[in-house]
Amino acid sequence: MDKHLANRVALITGGGQGIGRAVALRFAGEGAKVVAIDIVAESARAVADEIKAAGGEALAITCDVTRRDQIDALVGQVLDAYGQIDILCNNAGITRDARLVKMTEDEFDSVVDVNLKGVFNLTQAVAPHMIERGYGRVISASSIVGLYGNFGQTNYVATKAGVIGMTRVWARELGPKGITANAIAPGFIATDMIKTVPQKVLDDFAGRTPVRRLGTPEDVANAYLFLASEESGFINGIVLSVDGGLVV
């Protein structure tokens, strides 16, 4: 059986852990040359090494997505290594939760810088190369809270709603150039980000989800794979919820 991403070069931010790691491994298994991008060098290298050990091709790059100089260097390094960029997965994200009246300016700004401006930075840097080749897939991480809000997450919700808005603009601007732009909105996913959440609360999340479990990083990676594949070529500007039916 042909691999869905054979000969494609995929950039994955936040690729050293959680959902990003699962996406990197899934893409590599489908034949992609994976660029695992993470602010933690050891995490990115570990994922790239795991892919290489399984017979795949991967590159690990350390990058702060809020820094345009680092992003420009990253894009140059990828083009030097592979000569093309086909898929961009804007997956990097952070949380700094607090209620509105207690949220600090730094807590707001830091989340916006990574989760929203970081997505803009990478996409703006990569888009010209996709336009030149007449092909591309841009897939950005939103969240169900970006659609419906969540207590104590003014900053995070603002960024995830913003990602949806940017994605819909890019679908219109880049679609005529052969590039699709879509977003993924995960529900409650069992990653390190929720390790601090009490088990009782996690059990409540699972109970509220119609499929009666939390999602896994692999569940989300499968959605990324579909939107990165040729099968999604006529899907553009959507928000794909991966939430077990939590919000229907």
Image (tube, helix red, strand yellow):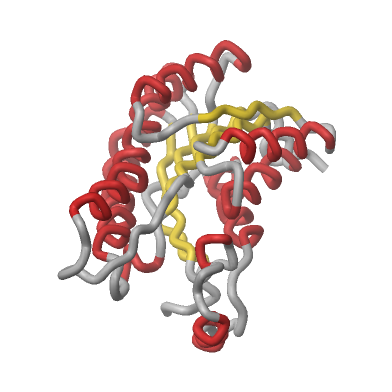
The location of residue 176, given as percent across then percent down, is 35, 31
**Side of 131 where 19 appears, left or right:** right
Up/down of 10 relative to 144, above or below: above
Residue toward you, 85 or 229? 85
**Side of 186 where 101 appears, left or right:** left
Up/down of 81 relative to 215, above or below: above
Quadrant (top left/top right/bottom left/bottom right) for the N terminus: top right
Residue at x 44% of width, y 61% of height: 185
Residue at x 20% of width, y 58% of height: 104
Residue at x 59% of width, y 67% of height: 190
Quadrant (top left/top right/bottom left/bottom right) for the C terminus: bottom left
Residue toward you, 162 or 191? 191
Residue toward you, 6 or 29? 29
The location of residue 173, given as percent across then percent down, is 29, 35
The location of residue 184, given as percent across then percent down, is 46, 56
Up/down of 31 relative to 102, above or below: above
Residue toward you, 192 or 12? 192
**Side of 164 where 108 appears, left or right:** left
Locate residue 120: give its quadrant. top left
Residue at x 43% of width, y 33% of height: 64
**Numbered marks: total:** 0
Locate residue 143: give its quadrant. bottom left
